[in-house]
C-alpha cells in the first residue's frame, strides 16, 4: 500500500487520540484492499472504523487488533440489518426526562486513556481540595483535547507549505530559556498575587503583556476563562500578546461520534445512529410538539397569574397545547427572609395559587409537563452552583394539584429522545460584563449577545468565571459542563430576548415574562429552533 494511504490511516486515528502499531496498520490496509476502497475514500472509510473503535469499553490508546476485528464485524453486521428498523409508535412521555444536576454521573477525563472514566464514589456538597483541583483539571483537559483534534492545531501528516507556518501548542514550561521566540499557549486567564493578569496551565504560569495587542478576537474574556494566546516571550519573563481568542468549539455530532457510548446525563446512552433515526422521526411525526419557556415568573406580582391564564386561554383557543412548560424563577420580586414566617407562608401560597390555576385547565394539566427552575432570589440552599430545587416545604400543595410537575435544580437538563436541552437561570450577561478582562472596543448590543453565546459554548461551561466571582460545588462542576455540546441551551436572563444558533447548538433567552407585554419563548424540537412569543396586556 502507498505511503499516502498509510499516512491517511495514521492521521485519522491520531485525530481520535489513538496510535497504530504495525499489526493494526496492516489489518486496516487489508480491510481497505478487501473492499477495493479507492484513495479518495480512504479517509471516510477509516473514520467510520475509528469512531466505532472509540466507542468500545476496552478501547486503549494504542489500537488493539482484537478490538479492531470486533469493530469490523460489528460494522459488517450493522450494514446488513440497517434496513430492518422497527417503526413503532413514538411514546413522547416515555422519552421526556428532566435531569437534576445532582443526579448526573460524574465523568472525569483520563489523560492515560485519553477518554472519560466514570467516578463510582459518592459525591458531596462540601468537596475537598483534590476535587477543586480535579474540577479545573477536567475543564482544561476537555477543552485541550478538542483543540488538539481541531484541524487548525493538528497538522496534516502530509508535508505541505502551510504546515511549516503552523504554530504548535506549547506549555509554559517550554518558554524557559527561549526569549525572543514566538509561541502559541493555551491556559486559563487568572490574576497573580501581585494583581497581574497571567495565563496558567498544568505546568505553571506566565505574565501577559497586552501593550502590543490592538484588540482581542470576538467573545468575552473573563478571569477563569480559557484562552488561546499567541505572542513573544521576553527576557523579562513576560509574554507579549499579539493575538488572543477562545478555544474552538466542537459540534455535537463530532463529539457524539467519539463519545457516543458514554451516558453523560445518566438516562441511558444512545448511539449516533439511533440519534439520527430519532431526529428523522421527530421531524416527520412530531412537528406539532412544542415547549414553552418562561422566566422571571414573579408569583407575587399581580399581573403574573393573569398572564399565565391568558397564555393558557390562547393555547386552548388555537388547540396549541405545549408538551413541556418550563417556569424559571425568580418566583418572587424580592428576597425571602429565612426568619420571616410571613414571607415563607406568602411564598407557599403563591405556588398554591399557581397550582390552582394549572388544575383549572384539565387539558393542559393532564398532558403537559411543568418544570420549575429556581432563580437567584428563590430560597434554595446557598448561592453556589448548581442550586438545589425549590424546597418541598413551599411546593407540597402545587405537587398535589399538578400531576406532571418536576422540581428541577438550576441548571437542569431535559432529555427528549436524541435531544439534550440545558436550562440555566442566571443573570449571566451582567455577571460576565462586570468581570471582563478584555473585549473588542465599540461593541454593539447585538454583538454582546453573540459574544456571550460564543463564549459560553467555546468554554464548554455555563459559568466560565473565577470561583471567587461565582462559586461552584467542585464535585458537581460536571453538571455545568457543555460537552458534548447540547442540542439547545436556555440562558434565562433578565437581559432582553434573543435566539441564535452557534455550531449547531440553538441558544435562546426568553427574557422576563412581564415587560411591555407577556413575553416567553417557544421551542420546537422538530426544527430545533425557538421563536419569541408574546401576548399583549388587556
Image (spheres, rainbow, N blue to C red):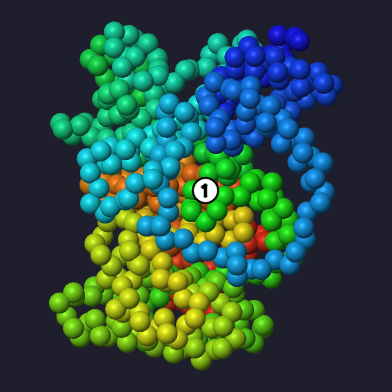
User: Relative to 237, is 263 above or below?
Assistant: below
The image quadrant that residue 438 belongs to is top left
Give me the residue at 81% from left, 18% from top.
Answer: 33
The residue depicted at 60 percent of the width and 64 percent of the height is: 95
Q: Residue furthest right?
A: 36
Q: Is residue 443 left or right of residue 122?
A: right
In this rendering, the answer to whether 26 lies above or below 223 is above
Horizontal and vertical percent position of residue 66: 63, 25
Point out the residue furthest to the bottom here.
Answer: 360
Counting from the top left corner in percent of width and height, residue 19 is at: 56, 19
Residue situated in front as seen by the camera: 515 or 249 = 249
How many numbered circles does the render carry? Answer: 1
Mark 1 secondary-structure assignment: loop
Instruction: Please tell me whether residue 300 is drawn above or below residue 3 in the rendered image.
Output: below
In the image: residue 510, left or right of residue 390: right
Residue 223 at least partly seen: no
Q: Is residue 184 above or below residue 48?
A: above
In this view of the protein, can residue 358 be seen by the observer? Answer: yes
Name the spot of residue 96 as percent of width and height, x first. Answer: 56, 65
Q: Which residue is mark 1?
A: 263
Q: Quadrant of residue 492?
A: bottom left
Mark 1 crowd level (few <14, some 14–19, many ≥20, 10 Å Cα):
some
Rendering coords of residue 343 (x, y %): 22, 82
Front residue (pair 194, 332): 332
- Tell me the residue at 39%/88% (across/down): 353
In this rendering, position of residue 388 left or right of residue 307 = left
Task: Locate the N terminus by quadrant.
Answer: top right
**Going by the image, does 219 lie left or right of 536?**
left
The quadrant holding residue 382 is bottom left
Amino acid at each position: 500500500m502507498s505511503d499516502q494511504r498509510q499516512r491517511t490511516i495514521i492521521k485519522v486515528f491520531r485525530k481520535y487520540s489513538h496510535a497504530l502499531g504495525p499489526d493494526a496498520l496492516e489489518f486496516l490496509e487489508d480491510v481497505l484492499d478487501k473492499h477495493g476502497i479507492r484513495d479518495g475514500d480512504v479517509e471516510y472509510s477509516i473514520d467510520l472504523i475509528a469512531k466505532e473503535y472509540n466507542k468500545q469499553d476496552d478501547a486503549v490508546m494504542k489500537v488493539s487488533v482484537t478490538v479492531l476485528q470486533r469493530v469490523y464485524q460489528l460494522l459488517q453486521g450493522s450494514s446488513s440489518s440497517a434496513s430492518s428498523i422497527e417503526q413503532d409508535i413514538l411514546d413522547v412521555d416515555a422519552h421526556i426526562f428532566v435531569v437534576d444536576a445532582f443526579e448526573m454521573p460524574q465523568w472525569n477525563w483520563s489523560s492515560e486513556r485519553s477518554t472519560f472514566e466514570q467516578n463510582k464514589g459518592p459525591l458531596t456538597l462540601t468537596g475537598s481540595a483534590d476535587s477543586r483541583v480535579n474540577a479545573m483539571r477536567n475543564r482544561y483537559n476537555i477543552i485541550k483535547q478538542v483543540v488538539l483534534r481541531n484541524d487548525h492545531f493538528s497538522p496534516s501528516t502530509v508535508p505541505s507549505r502551510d504546515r511549516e507556518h503552523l504554530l504548535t501548542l506549547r506549555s509554559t514550561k517550554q518558554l524557559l530559556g527561549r526569549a525572543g521566540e514566538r509561541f502559541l499557549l493555551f491556559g486559563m486567564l487568572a490574576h497573580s498575587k501581585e494583581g497581574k493578569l497571567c495565563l496558567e496551565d498544568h505546568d505553571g504560569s506566565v505574565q501577559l503583556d497586552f501593550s502590543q495587542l490592538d484588540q482581542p478576537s470576538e467573545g468575552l474574556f473573563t478571569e477563569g476563562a480559557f484562552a488561546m494566546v499567541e505572542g513573544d516571550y521576553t527576557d523579562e519573563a513576560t509574554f507579549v500578546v499579539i493575538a488572543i481568542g477562545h478555544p474552538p468549539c466542537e459540534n455535537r455530532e463530532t463529539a457524539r461520534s467519539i463519545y457516543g457510548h458514554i451516558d453523560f446525563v445518566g438516562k441511558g446512552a444512545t448511539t449516533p445512529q439511533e440519534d439520527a433515526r430519532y431526529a428523522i422521526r421527530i421531524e416527520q411525526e412530531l412537528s406539532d410538539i412544542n415547549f414553552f419557556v418562561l422566566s422571571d415568573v414573579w408569583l407575587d406580582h399581580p399581573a403574573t397569574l393573569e398572564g399565565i391564564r391568558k397564555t393558557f386561554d390562547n393555547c386552548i383557543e388555537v388547540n396549541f397545547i405545549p408538551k413541556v412548560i418550563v417556569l424559571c424563577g425568580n418566583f418572587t420580586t424580592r428576597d425571602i427572609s429565612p426568619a420571616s414566617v410571613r414571607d415563607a407562608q406568602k411564598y407557599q401560597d403563591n405556588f398554591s395559587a399557581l397550582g390552582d390555576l394549572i388544575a383549572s385547565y384539565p387539558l393542559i394539566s393532564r398532558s403537559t409537563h411543568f418544570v420549575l427552575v429556581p432563580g437567584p432570589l428563590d430560597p434554595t440552599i446557598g448561592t453556589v452552583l448548581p442550586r438545589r430545587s425549590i424546597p418541598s416545604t413551599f411546593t407540597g400543595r402545587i405537587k398535589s394539584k399538578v400531576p406532571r410537575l418536576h422540581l428541577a435544580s438550576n441548571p437542569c437538563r431535559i432529555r427528549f429522545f436524541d435531544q439534550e436541552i440545558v436550562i440555566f437561570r442566571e443573570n449571566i450577561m451582567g455577571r460576565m460584563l462586570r468581570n471582563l478582562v478584555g473585549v473588542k472596543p465599540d461593541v454593539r448590543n447585538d454583538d454582546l449577545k453573540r459574544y456571550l453565546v460564543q463564549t459560553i459554548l467555546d468554554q464548554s461551561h455555563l459559568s466560565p468565571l473565577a470561583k471567587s466571582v461565582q462559586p461552584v460545588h467542585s464535585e458537581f462542576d460536571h453538571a455545568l459542563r457543555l460537552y458534548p455540546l447540547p442540542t439547545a441551551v436556555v440562558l434565562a436572563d433578565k437581559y432582553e430576548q434573543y435566539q441564535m444558533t452557534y455550531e449547531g447548538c440553538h441558544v435562546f433567552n426568553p427574557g422576563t415574562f412581564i415587560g411591555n407585554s407577556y413575553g416567553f419563548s417557544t421551542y420546537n424540537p422538530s426544527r430545533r429552533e425557538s421563536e419569541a412569543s408574546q401576548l399583549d396586556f388587556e
